[in-house]
């Protein structure tokens, strides 16, 4: 559908910027640049918006706000970081309270450099964002039409690892929101760490249209199979994909006595899913002030 | 059988009361109450079933009874005199003595010198002493069944009242229940007696019971209020006594004889007027409304039984009985005006308070006003509407009172604000309250049908009185919807409190809820079997008030609304639940309550409060204004009554409705459904294009509105509360439906009701979403509805007065001379800016980014639902423009030009004016309505 390209509604948030870029964004809406030509409206409301324009770097104070607004936008959505502070933290980068560019908090799709970014550049950035939006919409549609039988689940290769990591960060965002805690380990994992994981563990991937939309990993120690990191892209959740991933890895890990998995104590959907698959809670361990790990086990039948 | 039934109906509750006085043990008393209630209820049903077969009534040994009554009356007067003197309320004592001397003297006279033959023959269903016709039977059923249910409710309530909530009060339950039943007996007496002295006797007993029960708590406040209630009722009693003497001197000693006199001699009219005056005080009309408000200190069953369902109904019952004597007389107009003022003022006051019981009390006063108005008009359709109102009001209001009683005990407050989220905390009760409220005002349920009939009756008789109705209706809409919304608003997980409610209470509540639904659905049956025979004279409600087609349409609407619960089967549909928008400052909270980061790092809990427009109106101010307005009206009119002024009787020739064939309907529907969104969308695009041009921009393409909707259709659906979307679906459904009604040439009033219903669904959706922005948006939308509703109704009335029909087709076929409605048209334009949510009145939501409410009422809707809202607005706008065209229907080209001009004018105004405060919206809209709408009505009265 090309309608996404014809009706991008934006929400504009000014993080800790000097307001230079902020003013340029507003200038785009004024008669001289008149972005409404492209159907762009400044909605001022995340629930109506498609494009999130953020100016300025992110600091401790406004990081939750940026995250909240992002979480409250309906999919498909794109984020445009505007100005050099938005893209990298700019001259505030070293400041004690500054976390850095927008992408330290939420995934950014388009970076518009400049200090201050010129209106032409901002408009150009939004137009680029339209392509991303279009692409995301196609992806969403694929998910809508994909029925559970058509997922292809394979073992992952070394070259899939960066894509799986990116997916992991998207999928675990909801977990971080659930606990209000960014220290969820899956989010903090680096490429080196996941590569190390890959060397010792078995990775599975689910693929639609050549894109990885889900993954799971597991390892076998003696008679126990440890299952971890069930990842499903948000568009594809609740379609039975996780169930199939878990079943598949149980098979792949072969002949063991006990399967074990763990998840956070507030992740009710995960707990429910494991429960449905025959897992029973065995113990809990505190992980951080906000998160407790719940361990679940199931005996092979 | 009948002959024995009536004394038994009156006597049994009195006896039960006597027995109850001596039962001191709670459980035993409870069962005694149940048994007595069951017998009483069965009795009333048996009476109702037999009344149709057997209408001969024997004279009981009337003189002995009269003598007994006189003795009891003397005792009551003695007791009250002692009470009033002890309380140093000498005004009350004076009133009491005066009426006692008048009435007792007259009765003694009558006993000593038995009356000569009555003036005229009495109806077949009555003797000089007793009376049992359709209206009596209806009242008996209301008293027996609804009163009975309240009796079943009462023991559980009173136990909790004393044990948990008011241990400090003296337990006077034996007296309470005794009085309750004595009162019921007296009520049966009032509605079954024909002899005026007898009615008066029972009338005084209800005054006494009311006095005792209001003062039940024995606090200073309750004592004062009880005394005030009695004083005002004694004024009415004095009027009653005077009427008895006056009419008696003309040989009229019973109701049926009086009715058969019609509009006769001056003395009879004045006598009827005095009786109506008694009725007005009993029904707590302005200027006497104060006593009913004070009566709310009594325990809730008392409020439900005496002060909403039955005793105050005795007042309106009497007024309705007098309809033949009042019709077309100046006294009648006076009574009607009192009722009309009361309806308007009562509704306006109810807007200003958050005390649920007070809201119910004011709304009771207001609705009784409507019934009094019907009685004053006295025409057949008015009486029909009045009796319907009695039924619907008795059922729904009893339900609401009882619900509030339970809620008050469980959440320790009866403040509407504290009822936020009741749908989670006490789901069953909340649904019952919703049923009650829906029954009270929502299209297409009971009360609304009656209100429609009242409106039509008024326009047929005295169009100017409709001013009071249109403003009163707007206020009614306002206070009920905000209560409804409050129940739905949820800002976090809540504790369930629906525990330990006595079985008797559940029985009463469930039965009343069921009765509310049944009466709403079964009203055509009630109408044909009860009301039409009573009104007689070949009156047929369907033909003369409703119209077959409208009945079908209302059935359709009822069916649609009834489908609403079905949407909950869709509850777990794939929607993503996210937090409400709080400017991004949401905080996580362990207990599920919504909190946000305030300034300087403070943590604030989310709280939202309804509008009570205190500065604008103010409870006390409006109440006092109503009081003086009523007094002034009474004085002025009392002067006029004695002047020999003729009344301009104006009869609007009613048009025979033009029937559409099914095929025609199908074609129109198809055209409307397909074209309206197309036109609406293009207009929206054109609007944006023109706006851009006015600002020196190029602007979006004209098809932009379609792109937007197509995009929204493909977005994810995120919600704060899963059920919020259900309301949007019904908003869409009814918005489209009202347009369909319009273009199929249906009744304009129905179109308005349907549009209003759509708006209410929209508002409830935003309440349900429970975000501060959507909440304020909803409140403002509601205010805007209250602001434009009077003018919209008046515009419909104006069209009726000029063409003789409310039907769009007929108006189109018999075009109005636009000059006749010019003032109204200008007023209509004014409220159109509000209805279109255009600057300066884009208060609830706006297309522009400069909205201080974020997106107001639409804030929490996304994806398909937002798209539906857009499309619904397109449909709505097309209807509104078509209505503009209807003003100029005499020539299609002129009509089209007018529509185009209005469209450009709206855009011009939108871009030229700054947004104004909501206060300005509502006051200016009402002033414009008053000046232009009413001005036009006056003009129409002279311009034939």
Image (cartoon, helix red, strand yellow):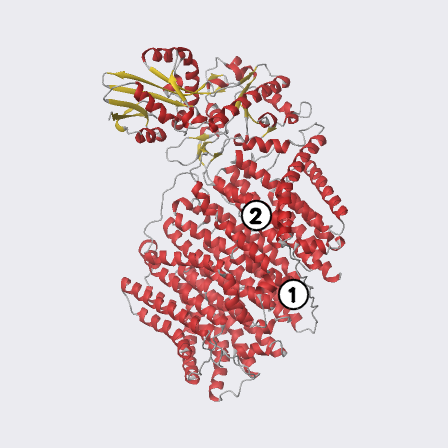
Q: What residue is pinned by disc 2?
A: B615
Task: State the image coordinates of residue B741 (x, y, percent, origin top left).
Answer: 61, 50
Relative vertical location of residue A103 with respect to residue B259 in this rendering, above or below = above
The mark found on residue B207 in the picture is: none
| B453 versus B201 height, above or below | above
Q: Is residue B830 left or right of residue A169?
A: right
Left or right of B367 in this view: A191: left
Cα–Cα span, label 2 and label 1? 36 Å
For mark 2, give the secondary structure: loop
Q: Which residue lies at the image location 37% right of the left edge and 26% below the top edge?
A: A242
Please provide percent x and percent y for residue B196.
50, 78
The quadrant in which the C terminus of chain B is found is bottom right
Residue B521 in the figure: left or right of residue B937: left
Quarter of the image that includes the N terminus of chain B: bottom left
Depth-wise, is mark 2 or mark 1 nearer the camera? Answer: 1
In the depicted structure, whether residue B191 falls above or below residue B581: below
Residue B359 visible in image = yes
Residue under disc 2 on the same chain as residue under disc 1: yes
Residue position for label 1: B461
Q: Residue B245 sits in which quadrant?
A: bottom right
Q: Nearer the viewer, residue A161 or B934?
A: A161
Which chain does the residue under circle 2 lie in?
B
Count residues near mark 1 (Cα–Cα under 10 Å), then give few for <14, some for 14-19, many for 20+.
many
* Residue B352 in view (yes/no): no
Label 2 vs 1, first from the N-terminus: 1
């Amino acid at each position: 559908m090309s309608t996404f390209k014809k009706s991008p509604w934006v929400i504009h948030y000014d993080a800790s910027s000097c307001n230079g870029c902020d003013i340029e964004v507003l200038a785009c809406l004024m008669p001289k640049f008149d972005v409404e030509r492209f159907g762009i409206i400044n909605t001022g409301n995340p629930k109506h918006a498609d494009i999130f324009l953020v100016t300025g770097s992110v600091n401790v104070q406004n990081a939750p706000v940026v995250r909240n607004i992002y979480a409250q936008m309906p999919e498909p959505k794109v984020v445009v970081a505007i100005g050099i502070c938005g893209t990298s933290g700019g001259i505030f980068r070293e400041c004690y309270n500054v976390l850095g560019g927008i992408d330290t908090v939420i995934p950014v799709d388009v970076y518009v450099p400049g200090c201050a970014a010129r209106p032409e550049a901002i408009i150009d950035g939004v137009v680029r964002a339209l392509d991303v939006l279009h692409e995301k919409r196609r992806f969403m549609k694929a998910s809508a039409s994909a029925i559970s039988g058509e997922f292809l689940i394979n073992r992952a290769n070394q070259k899939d690892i960066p894509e799986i990591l990116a997916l992991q960060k998207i999928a675990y965002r909801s977990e971080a929101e659930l606990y209000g805690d960014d220290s969820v380990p899956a989010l903090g994992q680096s490429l080196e760490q996941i590569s190390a994981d890959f060397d010792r563990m078995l990775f599975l991937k689910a693929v639609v249209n050549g894109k990885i939309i889900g993954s799971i990993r597991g390892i076998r120690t003696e008679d126990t199979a440890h299952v971890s990191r069930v990842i499903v892209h948000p568009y594809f959740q609740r379609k039975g994909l996780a169930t199939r991933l878990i079943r598949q890895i149980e098979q792949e890990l072969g002949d063991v006595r006990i399967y074990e998995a763990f998840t956070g104590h507030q992740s009710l959907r995960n707990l429910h899913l494991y429960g449905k698959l025959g897992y029973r809670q065995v113990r809990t361990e505190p992980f951080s002030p906000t998160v407790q790990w719940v361990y679940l086990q199931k005996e092979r039948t | 059988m009948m002959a024995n039934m009536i004394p038994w109906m009156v006597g049994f509750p009195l006896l039960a009361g006597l027995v109850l006085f001596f039962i001191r043990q709670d459980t035993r008393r409870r069962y005694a109450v149940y048994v007595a209630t069951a017998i009483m209820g069965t009795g009333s049903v048996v009476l109702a079933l037999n009344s149709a077969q057997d209408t001969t009534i024997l004279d009981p040994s009337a003189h002995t009874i009269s003598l007994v009554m006189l003795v009891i009356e003397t005792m009551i007067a003695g007791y009250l005199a002692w009470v009033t003197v002890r309380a140093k309320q000498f005004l009350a004592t004076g009133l009491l003595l005066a009426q006692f001397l008048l009435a007792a003297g007259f009765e003694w006279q009558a006993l000593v010198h038995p009356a000569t033959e009555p003036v005229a023959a009495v109806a077949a269903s009555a003797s000089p002493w007793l009376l049992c016709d359709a209206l009596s039977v209806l009242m008996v059923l209301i008293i027996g069944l609804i009163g009975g249910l309240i009796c079943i409710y009462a023991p559980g309530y009173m136990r909790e009242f004393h044990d948990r909530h008011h241990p400090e009060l003296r337990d006077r339950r034996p007296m309470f229940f005794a009085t309750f039943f004595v009162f019921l007996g007296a009520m049966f007496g009032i509605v079954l007696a024909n002899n005026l002295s007898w009615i008066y006797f029972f009338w005084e007993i209800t005054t006494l019971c009311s006095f005792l029960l209001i003062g039940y708590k024995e606090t200073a406040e309750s004592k004062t209020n009880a005394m005030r209630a009695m004083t005002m009722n004694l004024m009415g009693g004095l009027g009653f006594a005077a009427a008895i003497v006056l009419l008696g001197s003309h040989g009229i000693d019973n109701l049926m004889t009086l009715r058969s006199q019609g509009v006769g001699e001056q003395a009879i009219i004045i006598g009827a007027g005095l009786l109506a005056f008694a009725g007005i005080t009993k029904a707590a009309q302005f200027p006497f409304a104060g006593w009913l408000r004070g009566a709310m200190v009594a325990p809730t069953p008392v409020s439900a039984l005496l002060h909403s369902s039955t005793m105050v109904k005795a007042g309106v019952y009497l007024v309705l009985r007098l309809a033949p004597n009042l019709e077309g007389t100046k006294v009648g107009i006076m009574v009607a005006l009192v009722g009309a003022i009361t309806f308007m003022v009562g509704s306006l006051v109810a807007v200003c308070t958050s005390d649920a019981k007070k809201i119910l009390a004011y709304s009771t006063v207001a609705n009784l006003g409507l019934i009094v108005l019907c009685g004053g008009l006295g025409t057949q359709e008015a009486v029909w509407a009045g009796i319907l109102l009695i039924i619907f009001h008795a059922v729904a209001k009893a339900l609401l009172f009882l619900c509030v009683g339970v809620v008050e005990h469980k959440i320790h407050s009866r403040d509407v604000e504290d009822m936020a989220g009741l749908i989670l905390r006490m789901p069953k009760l909340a649904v019952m309250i919703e049923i009650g409220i829906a029954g009270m005002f929502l299209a297409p349920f009971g009360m609304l049908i009656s209100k429609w009939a009242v409106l039509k009756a008024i326009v047929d008789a005295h169009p100017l009185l409709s001013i009071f109705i249109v403003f009163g209706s707007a206020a009614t809409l306002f206070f009920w919807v905000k209560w409804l919304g409050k129940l739905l608003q949820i800002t976090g997980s809540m504790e369930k409190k629906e525990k330990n409610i006595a079985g008797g209470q559940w029985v009463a509540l469930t039965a009343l809820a069921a009765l509310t639904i049944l009466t709403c659905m079964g009203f055509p049956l009630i109408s044909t079997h009860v009301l039409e025979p009573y009104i007689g004279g070949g009156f047929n409600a369907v033909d003369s008030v409703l119209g077959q087609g409208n009945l079908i349409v209302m059935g359709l609407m009822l069916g649609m609304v009834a489908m609403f619960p079905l949407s909950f089967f869709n509850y777990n549909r794939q929607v993503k639940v996210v937090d409400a928008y709080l400017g991004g400052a949401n905080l996580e909270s362990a207990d599920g309550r919504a909190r946000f980061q305030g300034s300087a790092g403070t943590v604030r809990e989310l709280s939202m409060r309804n509008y009570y427009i205190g500065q604008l109106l103010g409870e006390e101010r409006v109440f006092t204004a109503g009081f003086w307005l009523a007094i002034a009206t009474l004085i002025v009119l009392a002067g006029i009554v004695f002047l020999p002024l003729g009344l301009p009787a104006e009869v609007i020739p009613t048009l025979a409705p033009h029937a559409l064939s099914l095929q025609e309907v199908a074609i129109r529907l198809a055209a409307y459904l397909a074209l309206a969104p197309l036109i609406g969308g293009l207009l929206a695009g054109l609007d944006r294009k023109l706006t851009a041009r006015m600002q020196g921009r190029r602007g979006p393409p004209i098809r932009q509105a379609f792109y937007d909707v197509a995009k929204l259709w493909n977005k994810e659906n995120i919600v704060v509360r899963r059920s919020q979307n259900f309301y949007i679906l019904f908003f869409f459904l009814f918005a489209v439906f009202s347009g369909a009604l319009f273009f199929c040439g249906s009744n304009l009033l129905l179109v308005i009701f349907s549009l209003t219903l759509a708006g209410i669904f929209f508002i409830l959706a935003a309440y349900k979403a429970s975000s501060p922005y959507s909440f304020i948006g909803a409140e403002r939308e509601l205010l805007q509805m209250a602001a434009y509703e009077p003018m919209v109704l008046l515009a419909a009335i104006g069209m009726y007065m000029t063409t003789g029909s409310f039907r769009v087709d007929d108006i189109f076929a018999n075009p109005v001379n636009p000059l006749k409605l010019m003032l109204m048209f200008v007023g209509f334009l004014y409220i159109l800016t509000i209805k279109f949510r255009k600057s300066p009145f884009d208060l609830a939501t706006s297309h522009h980014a400069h909205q201080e409410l974020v997106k107001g009422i639409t804030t929490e809707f996304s994806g398909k639902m937002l798209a539906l809202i857009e499309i619904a607005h397109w449909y709505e706008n097309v209807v509104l423009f078509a209505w503009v065209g209807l003003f100029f229907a005499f020539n299609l080209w002129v009509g089209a030009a007018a529509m185009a001009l209005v469209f450009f004018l709206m855009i011009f105004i939108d871009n030229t004016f700054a947004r104004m405060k909501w206060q300005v919206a509502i006051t200016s809209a009402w002033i414009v309505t008053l000046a232009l709408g009413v001005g036009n009505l006056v003009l129409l009265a002279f311009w034939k």
